[in-house]
Each structure stands twice: as C-alpha cells, then as structure tokens.
C-alpha cells in the first residue's frame, strides 16, 4: 500500500507514524485487551492519555497555568456561538475583523447574541490583504476582539498579532495552530478545529484565560459553558475519546520533530518554495499580497480555467490528491499543514512544472 500526498484543507493528512501507532495499538492498547475507543473515559488509562495530551500541548504551545485547555466537540463552528455566549458577559458588543469566509461565518453567528462591530474588512480587495491595524475602528468597551489569523479558504494569513489593549483577543486558529510559535499570553482565547494540525474532525481545542471563565449567559447550554467544561476536565459528558487520543499522538510526534519552532521553519520553507515557483511561472498565479500569504493553504489559478479538470486528473494519477480549490474561489488550493512532508511539495512543483510546459 502506498500513501498519496493529500493536500486536503481538512480533514487533512496526518503524520504517518501517528497512523501506524494508532494501527498497532488498535486492538490492544498496551495490554489492556481493548482499543482506546472502547475504554471508559473515567478509567485510569484514558485519564492518563487525556492528561498527557494536555501536558504535551501546553509544552508545545507554551501555555501557562493562567489558561485552561479544553477538549470540546462540535468543531470550530460551534465556537462561533459558544464564544459570544460565554464572553459577552455584561457587555453589549464585540469587535470582529473580517478577512474572509471564516471571519464572516463567525460574525454572522455572533450577531445572534449581541452587537457586532466589524472593525476592519478586506472584502473590497476580494480578501487579498489584511487591513493595517492603525485603520481598525476598535471599541475599548468591546467584550472581546475576534479575528481569524489564517483564512483557510482564501489562503490569507496575518503576519502580526493584533494589539487589543485591555480587550481580550480571541483567535480562530483552526488552520494555523501549532504551525509556528505563537505567544499565547497575548490572547484571551484561542480555538482550533482539530482536523488540520491536531487530529480528527469534530474535536475542537479551546485555550482560555482563566479570568474569562464564569461569565456565560444563563441560557448558555451546559455543554457550551466553558466554566462547566473546565471544572469537569472536559469530561462533563463522554468526550471524543479516540480523537483526544489521536491528538495526543500528534502532539508527541510534533515534539519529536523539534516542536513548533522547528515546524515553523519547515513550514516557512515549504510555503516559500511553492510561492516562489508560482511567482516565477507565468502559467500560475496567487492573488494574495505576498506579506499575507498563508503558510498552510496555498491557493493558485492556472492561466486558463478550462484546463482545471485536466490538471486535477493528472494530479490524481500521480497521487497528488484534493487540490481542487474551495467552490467559492475556484482554481486550486494546496494545503500543506505540518504533516505534509516537504517531498509532497516537491512532487507538486514537479507536476506543475511539467503541466505548464505541456499546456502553457
Ligand atoms: C479557519 C476555520 N474556522 C472554522 C472552521 C470550521 O471548522 P469545523 O468544520 O470544525 O466546524 C474551519 C474549517 O475548515 C476553518 O478553516
């Protein structure tokens, strides 16, 4: 059996050693006579798996004891409502930055719970840039400031951490989490759907500063109340045990790779290689202002859209899978998360070179 290079934006490719370990431990996890999937979440064995995963994540991301780490369910999308329900408190409004489709979804959901002040938007540019922070119309009395550091669909990534003053900074890091070092202490809350750099879909990791707990509106569903989830070690109900275990294996793998700093260097190199190639070749184009090009999701177009299907067919035949761009933007998109080896990027560039020579 040979593994393809899977460029899917999510669920995305996972590190091969992680999958092999999960396979080896599937029927009998370390002499327990059962798989992790079949274990009680209250068992000593699973509690140890869960605690080790959290400890490794804290170490990798540099998360201090001032923060709670929650392993929740419902994907990143459920956080779009969980956040306003928990953080609006006695404030009436929250600030949001609009840099693409995921920002827009977060904004639309937050509007159901309070006043949303869109402090800046790059929609006019077709989301090809990030508005300079000096131009943002922020409100010092906002409950929080929400932004999306990496727009997975547009391939737009902030190259700075916004300064939110005393207003808690909230970030949807679904597609950038653990791809490079981040100063967690700058944030009130970070959340990430797992299916890119962490593990299986459905799981969502939430890192929340402890002073922000306990402010949920009274109508907040119990399962969405951060305080309840934190008080119960993310086990108020039956957690997504197998996903949590797999996330733990990914964290161990990341540590073996040298952690997020080493990973950031590799990711920078992979992305740089691909963008340099696209810029140097007239047949391909990427519309994003170079400073804000994503290290994780690289959208590109061919000189002639009529060739898209042929390009994708040829890519599939070489085991370069899921390169079709999101339906809202068209073209192609190569998602090159932590688990995509540099050899995958090299193989893609090789194919793109040959395709452009034949068809260009
Ligand atoms: C930046 C971003 N936010 C939110 C989501 C939604 O995540 P989920 O499907 O886990 O709800 C995604 C999914 O791709 C994403 O890329």
Image (cartoon, helix red, strand yellow):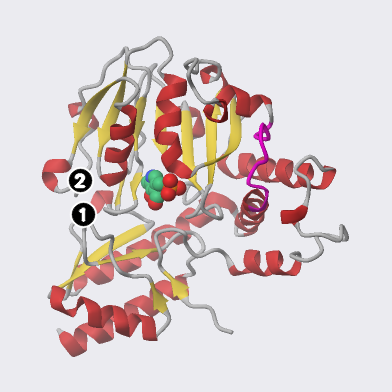
The x and y percentages for residue 171 are 40, 35
Would residue 352 appear left or right of 205 to someone viewing this image? left
Q: Which residues are magenta?
A: 233-242
- The image quarter in which residue 331 lies: bottom left
The x and y percentages for residue 24 are 74, 69
Residue 316 visible to an observer of this rendering:
yes
The crowd level at tag 1 (other Cα within 10 Å; few <14, some 14-19, many 20+) is: many
Residue plotted at (39% across, 34% down): 80
- The image quarter in which residue 105 lies: top left
Residue 162 visible to an observer of this rendering:
no
The x and y percentages for residue 159 are 32, 43
Residue plotted at (88% across, 61% down): 31
User: Which residue is at the far top?
Assistant: 90
User: Which residue is identified by label 1?
Assistant: 288
Q: Which mark is residue 129?
A: 2
Secondary element at tag 1: loop
Would residue 355 appear left or right of 173 to someone viewing this image? left
- Pick whichever, 36 or 303, lies toward us: 36
Quarter the C terminus occupies = bottom left
- Pick whichever, 313 or 53, lies toward us: 313
Decide: marks 1, 2 in contact (CB < 8 A)?
Answer: yes
User: Which residue is at the far bottom?
Assistant: 358
The x and y percentages for residue 277 are 27, 71
Residue plotted at (78% across, 66% down): 27
**Magenta segment main secondary structure:** loop
The crowd level at tag 2 (other Cα within 10 Å; few <14, some 14-19, many 20+) is: many
Ligand 1 closer than 8 Å to the CB at disc 1? no
Instruction: Say if 81 sits above or below 316 in the image.
Output: above
Residue plotted at (30% across, 54% down): 153
Counting the numbered discs, the total is 2
In 3D space, how far apart are the residues under numbered discs 1 and 2 (Cα atoms)?
A: 6 Å
């Amino acid at each position: 059996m040979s593994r393809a290079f899977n460029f899917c934006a999510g669920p995305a490719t996972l590190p091969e050693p992680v999958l092999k370990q999960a396979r080896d431990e599937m029927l009998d996890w370390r002499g327990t006579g059962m798989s992790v999937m079949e274990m009680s979440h209250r068992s000593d064995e699973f509690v140890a798996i869960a605690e080790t995963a959290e400890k490794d994540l804290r170490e990798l991301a540099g998360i201090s004891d001032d923060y709670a780490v929650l392993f929740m369910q419902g994907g990143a999308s459920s956080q779009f409502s969980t956040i306003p329900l928990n953080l609006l408190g006695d404030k009436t409004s929250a600030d949001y930055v609009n840099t693409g489709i995921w920002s827009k979804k977060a904004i639309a959901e937050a509007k159901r719970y309070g006043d949303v002040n869109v402090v800046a938007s790059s929609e006019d540019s077709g989301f090809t840039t990030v508005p300079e922070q000096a131009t943002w119309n922020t409100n010092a009395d906002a409950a929080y400031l929400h932004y999306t550091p990496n727009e997975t669909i547009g391939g737009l990534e902030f190259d700075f951490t916004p300064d939110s003053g005393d207003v808690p900074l909230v970030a949807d890091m679904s597609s950038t989490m653990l791809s490079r070092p981040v100063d967690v202490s700058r944030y009130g809350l970070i959340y990430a759907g797992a299916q890119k750099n962490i593990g299986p879909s459905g799981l969502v990791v939430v890192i929340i500063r402890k002073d922000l707990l306990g402010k949920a509106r009274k109508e907040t569903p119990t399962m969405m109340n951060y305080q309840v989830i934190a008080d119960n070690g993310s086990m108020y109900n039956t957690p997504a045990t197998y996903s949590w275990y797999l996330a733990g294996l990914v964290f161990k793998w990341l540590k073996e790779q040298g952690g997020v700093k080493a990973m950031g260097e590799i990711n920078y190199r992979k992305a740089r290689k691909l963008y340099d190639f696209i810029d140097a070749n007239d047949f391909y184009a990427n519309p994003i202002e170079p400073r804000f090009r994503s290290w994780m999701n690289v959208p590109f177009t061919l000189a002639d859209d009529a060739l898209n299907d042929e390009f994708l067919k040829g890519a599939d035949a070489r085991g370069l899978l899921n390169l079709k761009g999101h339906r809202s933007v068209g073209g192609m998109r190569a998602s090159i998360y932590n688990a995509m080896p540099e050899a995958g990027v090299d193989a893609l560039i090789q194919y793109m070179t040959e395709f452009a020579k034949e068809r260009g």
